[in-house]
Image (spheres, grey):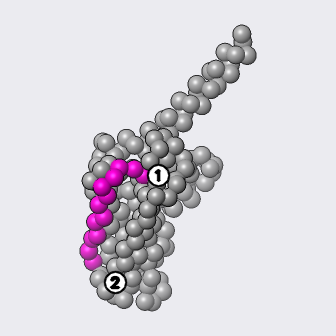
Amino acid sequence: MGLKRTLGSALSIILGAALCYAGLHYIPTLLRPTQVVDAVISPSGKSALDRDRNRLQRFGIYAQSFLLRRTYLRAGQGLTVHYTLPAGATLDLNIKQCRRSFVIEVFHCTLVSQQSVRIENKTNGRRTLKFAEPGFYHFDETVTLARPNEAYKLVWVRS
């Protein structure tokens, strides 16, 4: 009886931890629908998540697993990118939608669709991308500068 109880307790703890981790990705969408999800400030070119990842390196892979460039969006929500770019720069925004499978989508993304937007010849502004379907969306950007080491700033906001 002691071994069964120990295995049952271990399984309960593992299942509870997995559900808590998954819940951490869904809850912010409900509580703070206009939350900043990432920011990139150059000349380092590293996002806020990348800087946090370097600080959490001593805690191992588990702490870093919370710092992924993805967010859960409800139907009708979107991502807005506020940008400040130098003259001649090009900004490519890439957003990938994951297949809907409750809780599993937190751990594994099966690509359903991808949306790409190119912004050229603009130095300041914002671009909003709305999504009709709820689900997990991975986001990324590529900034091509006319001259190396120019300063730019990007802020991703759930809208």
- In terms of depth relative to the viewer, which is nearer, 63 or 102? 102
The chief SS type of the magenta part is: strand
Give the vertical position of 133 relative to 154 (above or below): above
Q: Taking 33 as reference, is 101 left or right?
A: right
Question: Element type at marker 2?
Answer: strand
**Residue visible at 30% across and 46% down?**
32
Give percent across and percent down for residue 26: 40, 43
Residue behind mark 1: 99
> Which quadrant of the rendered structure holds the C terminus?
bottom left
Q: Amino acid at mark 1?
A: Arg
The residue sitting at the top extreme is 1
> Which quadrant of the rendered structure holds the N terminus?
top right
| The stretch drawn in magenta includes residue 126 | yes
Q: Quarter of the image holding residue 10?
A: top right
Q: Quarter of the image holding residue 125?
A: bottom left
Give percent across and percent down for residue 84: 32, 76
| The stretch drawn in magenta includes residue 118 | no
Within 10 Å of disc 2 (Cα), the crowding (few <14, some 14-19, many 20+) is some
Magenta residues span 124-136
Give the vertical position of 95 relative to 119 (above or below): above
Residue behind mark 2: 120
